[in-house]
Amino acid sequence: MTRTDDSRLATIRSLLAKAESTPYSEEAEAFTAKATALMARYSIDQALLWAADTAQHAEPVERRLVVHRPFTAQKAVLVNQVATALRCRAVRLGREPGAPQEWISIVGFADDVDLVEELVTSLLVQMATAMNGAEPAMRQRPSDTASWRRSFMMGFIDVISHRLVEQQRDALADAERERTRPGAAAQSATSTALVLAERDDRVEAATRARFPRLRTSRVGGGSSSHGRRAGTSAGHAADLGGRRLPPRRELGQRSG
């Protein structure tokens, strides 16, 4: 990693620290917006550096994360959406009967996998905190409460997914404008989109090689419209840069 990269990552961490410490929501949002924009662009720039190093192309890696009960299915959806937005693949590996956690494999280039792990860790904590704060004070039947929470989580996840896609799209457009600007040092014959497409193909091939019998599954979203609205609102307010909390409180990892 270059000194420029080190400086940029330090700037991201500084912006996030300011966002987390300020008591003013508008100020926090501004700090977070800048930090997450830098994160998205950092990911693309790492891909461009990879494309330029044709002699020693890094290959996708696998990392296994663990999510804890309850609602492991909904948490797995969050992991999948974050991984997809950051150009990785997520594969649910399931859990042993009676085990309190579930393993999920993340396949992608190392820099992107790092971002997935950090962001998922943060969002799991934020989602749990927001859900506990928004849950109706009047306790319902356990089945109703569970449905409300599932609905909350899926609303939260939907918004997070859309926000991440928009950030990546904006970062890609910015990178391509820089590449094609007359006289730009980064100008080349290969578009940024083609570089990312090549990496996507390699990640997909690596995933299929590791897991040749993949299949899709559906996850229940709950039936509470109130929970869905509350989760959507919390998703809009979430910090996509990630809070620096100890990752194994909500998310563990194991190298694959």
Image: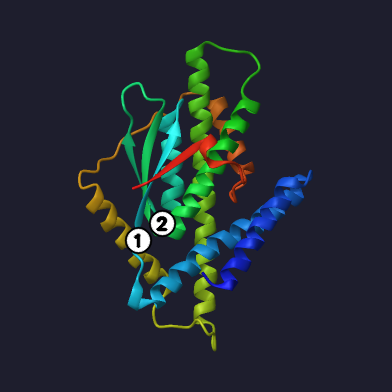
Give, as a three-letter code, the residue at label 2. Answer: Arg
Image-quadrant location for residue 246: top right
Circle 2 residue: 87
Is residue 221 visible in the rendered image? The answer is no
Locate residue 49, reporting x and y percent: 45, 73
Kind of element beneath mark 1 = helix
Which residue is nearer to you in this view: 108 or 252?
252
Image-quadrant location for residue 101: top left
Q: Say whether disc 1 or disc 2 marks the residue closer to the N-terminus.
A: 2
Which residue is nearer to you in this view: 256 or 179?
256
Circle 1 residue: 200
Which residue is nearer to you in this view: 80 or 69?
69
Residue that appears at 36% across and 67% down? 58
Residue lying furthest front: 255
Residue that appears at 57% across and 35% down? 127
Neighbourhood count class around disc 2 (C-alpha, 10 Å): few under 14, some 14–19, many 20 upward: many
